[in-house]
Image (cartoon, grey):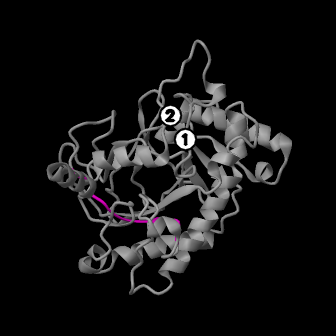
Amino acid sequence: MSGVSSEEIPIIDVSGAIAGDAQALERCARELRHAYEDVGFWFMTGHGVPQSLVDRVFLEAARFHAQPLEEKVALKINEHNIGYLAMKAATTRHSDVSTNNKPNLNEAFFVKRDLAADHPDVLANKRFRGANQWPAGLPGFREAVVAYCDAMEGVALSVLPIYAVALGLPAEHFAPAFREPQYTLRMSHYPHTPVLGEGEYGLAPHADTSFMTLLAQNKVPGLSLRTASGRWIDAPAIEGAFLVNSGQMLNRWSNGRFRATPHRVVNRSGSERYAIPFFFDCTIDHEMVCLPSCTDAAHPPKYEPTTYSQFMTWYQTQNYDHVRNAEGVRLQAN
């Protein structure tokens, strides 16, 4: 049940709603509405993802980042946002929470849907629909990561009716928009950073881009959330739960009704920290037009319609050095 204070992070057991219980669906929708309108984050329990699979992927993240740098750089991140992002290779520039940020003190490996080499989108080099880059020297890595992505996609799809009802829409409203969801798994490594300079973070304050982010619980602290009142709090950990938040795409789609809550990471734990956020979005070319329940004569749409491809192209150009550099070269060539 959700807490009384808007500064508490609600805990929502989704098992009944997933199982088709109409009363549970309505209850979860009320709690989700409170979470996104008043807080910005919530804890999902009753999701059914085996803890053993979650633990395995944390181990795989540590295993990947323990490789020699040359092995990781060989999988350098590309225009599809797939591959290895080196330490300090991204700077949070799009945030309205903090400015003048220094490059983020984390490294990450990005995976999307595991498309076959002969998939039409791969052959056409469609942006954000490329083939994954897999490490050659880590047996079992690909299998574990794909299994986790499959499980997380299933959970995210199963709770879409809760989102729809929470927004005053029919339970099936989002189904056409998510006929083949776009998603990204980010396997991050935050080294211990006891001393930070001004504007320096493991990950600077920002709001996610996604419709929904699902974050497996981390035994090593470091994540902080900004509440609706503007106060920063350390994220608590609830064993077996996912910490879930909406990002800029759902915020835009809902005409600002559902919050995109700022958060940041600083690792002063004394040990290495790994994180495996799963970013879930609608079908890549689906146009997100202001939801009918979120606009009326007194509340006209605040944002132009957009697609995942359009929004993420803008976002990456703002924040990722490899994309900014490539765009600069392209402009010079023209």
Q: Residue at x 41, y 48 (%)?
A: 312
Assess disc 1: are there few (<14), some (14-19) or many (≥20) residues with their C-alpha within 10 Å of its C-alpha.
some
Q: In what quadrant of the picture does the N terminus appear? A: top right
Q: Is residue 240 above or below residue 176?
A: below
Name the N-terminal-most of marks 1 and 2. Answer: 1
Q: Which residue is more in the foreground, 58 or 177?
A: 177
**Outermost residue toward the left?**
332
Are the residues flagged by discs 1 and 2 in contact, CB closer than 8 Å? yes
281 part of magenta stretch: no
Horizontal side of residue 241 vs 264, given as left or right: right
Q: Secondary structure at mark 2?
A: loop
Stretch of the chain drawn in magenta: 103-115
Horizontal side of residue 229 vs 293, given as left or right: left
Q: Which residue is mark 2?
A: 305
Q: Which residue is mark 1?
A: 287
Horizontal side of residue 295 vs 79, given as left or right: right
Question: Residue 60 location in percent, x, y?
Answer: 46, 75
Q: Amino acid at mark 2?
A: Pro
- Kindly tell me whether residue 70 is visible in this rendering: yes
Question: Residue 74 location in percent, x, y?
Answer: 28, 77
- Image quadrant of residue 288? top right
Instruction: Determine the CA span between mark 1 and mark 2.
Output: 6 Å
Q: Amino acid at mark 1?
A: Glu
